[in-house]
Amino acid sequence: MGEVKLITTSDGSHSLFNAELGETYHSVHGAIQESMHVFVKNGLEYFQEKTKQAEINVLEIGFGTGLNALLTIQKSLSYPTLIHYESLEAFPIEEEISSKLNYPKILNFTASEKYFLQLHQSGWGEQIDITNTFSLLKRHTKLQDVDLEAEKYDVIFFDAFAPSKQPELWELAVLRKVEQSMKSGAVFVTYCARGQLKRDLKSLGLLVETLPGPPGKKEMVRAVKS
Ligand SMILES: C[S@@+](CC[C@H](N)C(=O)[O-])C[C@H]1O[C@@H](n2cnc3c(N)ncnc32)[C@H](O)[C@@H]1O
């Protein structure tokens, strides 16, 4: 996937720029702001508040910098809920890069540095408990190649590169595989609000909402399985 370069986004948090794709890992208007808004607030929190479920299975597409995982740990510290966090990544970043990311410093909650290190240092394919209420399973694989268990997940963080850069990850057959892995009532969230994506998710039977996006972005999508 080529070289990545550390950049600073408008809220002061880092992101990465992939020169080969000409694409950043987050919104340049603010990486933390975007991840909080799209994935934590409109995905995880929305589901938790709606269901009050004691255990939540999260599937993330694209582990990348580990920002969504760290924000989820932060959230889980104020929840009684058990979170099983599974994340797929085809092209893991090097430790030289992950060790420079300023997320744990900016978020600055108890043991944020330690947890961020554990997120990156944990082995691929091994489920580990990072806290009493947060377990992690990172899988080193392409979404297109992986088998996903049917009706397993409650919340999907769909954080692949944009459809204009990686159209193969947004194809209907791939979205169908993800949809089949969702439980009834599960929530799919993404920063992308393309018409084609919304039509495809609707054609799979999901209830699609267009929500206001994070600062600097007009819209995002949430889709719920009935
Ligand atoms: C938009 S970035 C977001 C990453 C992450 N959620 C974060 O906050 O840093 C997309 C991620 O998807 C990964 N990726 C690219 N192709 C993939 C594939 N076929 N399957 C799974 N992940 C892929 C990239 O390497 C990158 O880490």
Image: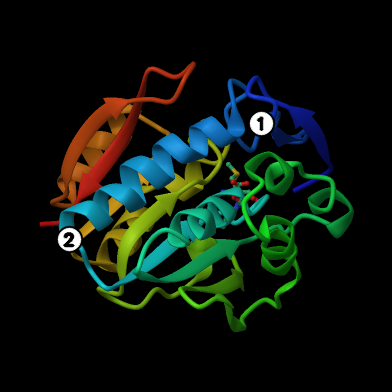
Quarter assignment of residue 225? bottom left
x, y percent for residue 201 = 24, 45
Inter-mark Cα distance, 2 to 1: 36 Å
Mark 2: is the Cβ under 8 angstroms from ligand 1? no
Disc 1 is placed on an element classified as: strand
Q: Nearer the viewer, residue 122 or 205?
A: 122
- The percent position of residue 32, horizontal first and vertical second, equals 57, 36
Tell me the amino acid under the disc marked 1. Glu
Report crowding for label 1: few under 14, some 14 to 19, many 20 or more residues within 10 A (C-alpha). Answer: some
Comparing 113 with 171, the one in front is 113
Q: Secondary structure at mark 2?
A: helix
Total marks shown come to 2
| Residue 104 appears left or right of 219 | right
For the point 84% across and 46% down, the residue is 100
Quadrant placement of the C terminus = bottom left
User: What is the crowding at mark 2: few (fewer than 14 residues within 10 Å), some, or many (at least 20)?
Assistant: few
> Can you say whether 84 is above or below 66 in the image?
below
Q: Give the image location of residue 195, x and y in percent.
A: 29, 27
Relative to 153, residue 116 above or below: above
The answer to whether the beta carbon of the residue marked 1 is less than 8 Å from any atom of ligand 1 is yes
Q: Residue at x 84, y 43 (%)?
A: 3
Compared across the picture, whether 5 is left or right of 206 comes to: right
- Mark sitting on residue 105: none
| Among the 4 quarters of the image, the one containing residue 197 | top left
- The percent coordinates of residue 171 (x first, y second) are 39, 47
- 67 and 223: which one is in front? 67
- Residue tagged 1: 23
Q: Which residue is mark 2?
A: 51
Circle 2: residue type: Thr
Q: Residue at x 63, y 43 (%)?
A: 107
Q: Earlier in the sequence, mark 2 or mark 1?
A: 1
**Residue farthest right in this picture:** 96
